[in-house]
């Protein structure tokens, strides 16, 4: 028996409960205003403003010209799987074999596939929050329950092993750690990560480590921690990664899963009935991204650091705004709660008014389960960041004097 009228608008419960990602929605709103010639300064963006490096583009063009246009294996080209494994070995001293790597259509797809492959109805997944909204939605889409663990500004939004431990239950199937985190920029402490790994082993859950921003770090992190985790929790440790941010390849849609072979094979089987495989010539270009010169990555990280420092100093000059210094990634996440008022009772309301009255688009904290905050992207050129911060400062001053 089906409920409803059976038409194509009679959506499944799954689709009816899901909404477009709030970060994407805000960026689309800003783009629509731009289309009407009223373009705000758009600091919602979750993608680098820099172009994909030339050698990667050339590799894709060469691949197209040489006929690399057919289906590939669902888990991806074996050379690319090996190149991902090699990159991790070189950067993070962590060892996975090529058949413990699945290539996916982006990091979001990596998360989606792993959730589909791991989770059943009734399972719980612990997610430190403020969090990237796709974490909780991917868990829900797999029928499981996200359990949010709230981290706090006064602790630098750090998640600790103790906080995770308190949230576990016999139904805990996985814990997601995102470091550096979107939206807070928090970098998980190596010791806590190891204790969480230990817990994963003892309490039989999987640790999903999302390292989308791992190459954009503003402080030193011991690279050997991932191998230490791998040694202690090998069959319960999964890395979700992407070429999007590191190589300015957001539109190319290329990500990966590093996991025990059983899970990699399950992801490939799921992909074989949906996307079939990541785009063939994009995979060839990704080999070049991973094995070619890495200078552009270092230059990009240096550029973001300068932008971060500028935005932090602009925020520090605004009365009653506080902000944790991000340790990585390309967002800052200031607390603007003390500027809320009956006329502007939430950061969602502030976001709309900022867009309409000040010509500035940011993502309200509600998108990350963190009302009272706004997310400012550093992935815009300095002149736009400068103008954006001027507009934010002037807007908040106007509210003060209203
Ligand atoms: C924490 C985190 N993980 C993964 C991704 C996935 O990016 P993509 O699907 O472009 O690879 C994003 C994108 O915003 C992100 O913020």
Image: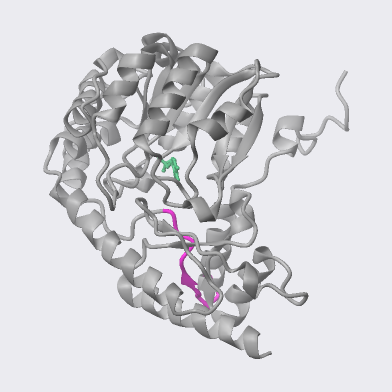
**Image quadrant of residue 143?**
top right
Determine which quarter of the picture holds residue 301. bottom left
Picture quarter with ligand 1: top left
Q: Residue 35: give x, y in percent of width and height.
A: 52, 71
The stretch in magenta equals 35-46
**Residue at x-position 73% and y-position 75%:** 341
Residue at 56 percent of width and 27 percent of height: 165
The foreground one among 59 and 308 is: 308
Judging from the image, the colouring scheme is one colour
Residue 319 spot, x, y in % from top left: 53, 79
Horizontal side of residue 326 vs 26, given as left or right: left
Residue 157 x/y as whole percent: 50, 49
Which quadrant of the view contains residue 178?
top left
Q: Quick check: 59 above or below 277?
A: below
Of the pair 176 and 16, the residue shown nearer to us: 176
Residue that lies at the very extreme toward the top in this rendered image:
262
Residue at the image position 64 percent from the left and 24 percent from the top:
124
Residue 39 part of the magenta-drawn span = yes
The reply to whether the magenta stretch includes residue 274 is no
> Considering depth in this image, is 27 or 388 the residue closer to the camera?
388
Residue 276 appears in the figure: no
């Amino acid at each position: 028996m089906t409920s409803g009228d059976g038409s194509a608008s009679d959506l499944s419960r799954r689709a009816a409960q899901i909404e477009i990602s709030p970060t994407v929605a805000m960026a689309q709103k800003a783009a629509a205003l731009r289309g009407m010639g009223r373009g705000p300064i758009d600091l919602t963006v979750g993608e680098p403003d820099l172009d994909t490096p030339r050698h990667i583009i050339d590799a894709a063009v060469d691949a197209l010209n040489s006929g690399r246009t057919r289906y590939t294996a669902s888990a991806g080209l074996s050379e690319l799987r090996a190149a991902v494994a090699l990159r991790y070995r070189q950067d993070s001293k962590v060892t996975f074999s090529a058949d413990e790597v699945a290539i996916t259509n982006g990091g979001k797809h990596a998360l989606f596939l792993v959730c589909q492959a791991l989770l059943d109805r009734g399972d719980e997944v612990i997610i430190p929050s403020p969090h990237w909204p796709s974490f909780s939605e991917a868990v829900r889409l797999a029928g499981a329950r996200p359990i949010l663990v709230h981290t706090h500004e006064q602790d630098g939004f750090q998640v600790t092993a103790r906080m995770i431990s308190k949230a576990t239950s016999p139904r805990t199937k996985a814990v997601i750690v995102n470091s550096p985190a979107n939206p807070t920029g928090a970098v998980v402490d190596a010791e806590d990560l190891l204790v969480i790994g230990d817990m994963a082993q003892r309490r039989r859950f999987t640790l999903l480590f999302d390292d989308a921003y791992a190459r954009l770090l503003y402080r030193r992190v011991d690279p050997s921690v991932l191998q230490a985790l791998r040694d202690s929790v090998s069959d319960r440790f999964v890395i979700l990664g992407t070429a999007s941010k590191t190589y300015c390849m957001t539109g190319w849609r290329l990500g990966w899963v590093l996991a025990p072979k059983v899970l990699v094979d399950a992801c490939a089987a799921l992909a074989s009935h949906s996307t079939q495989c990541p785009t063939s010539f994009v995979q060839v270009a990704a080999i070049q991204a991973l094995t070619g010169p890495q200078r552009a990555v270092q230059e990009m990280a240096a550029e973001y650091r300068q932008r971060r420092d500028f935005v932090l100093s602009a925020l520090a000059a605004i009365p009653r705004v506080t902000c944790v210094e991000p340790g990585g990634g390309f967002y800052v996440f200031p607390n603007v709660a003390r500027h809320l008022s009956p006329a502007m009772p939430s950061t969602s309301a502030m976001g709309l008014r900022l867009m309409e009255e000040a010509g500035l688009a940011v993502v309200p904290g509600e998108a990350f389960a963190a009302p009272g905050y706004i997310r400012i992207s550093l992935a815009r050129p300095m002149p736009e960041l400068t103008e954006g911060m001027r507009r934010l400062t002037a807007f908040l001053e106007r509210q003060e004097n209203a």
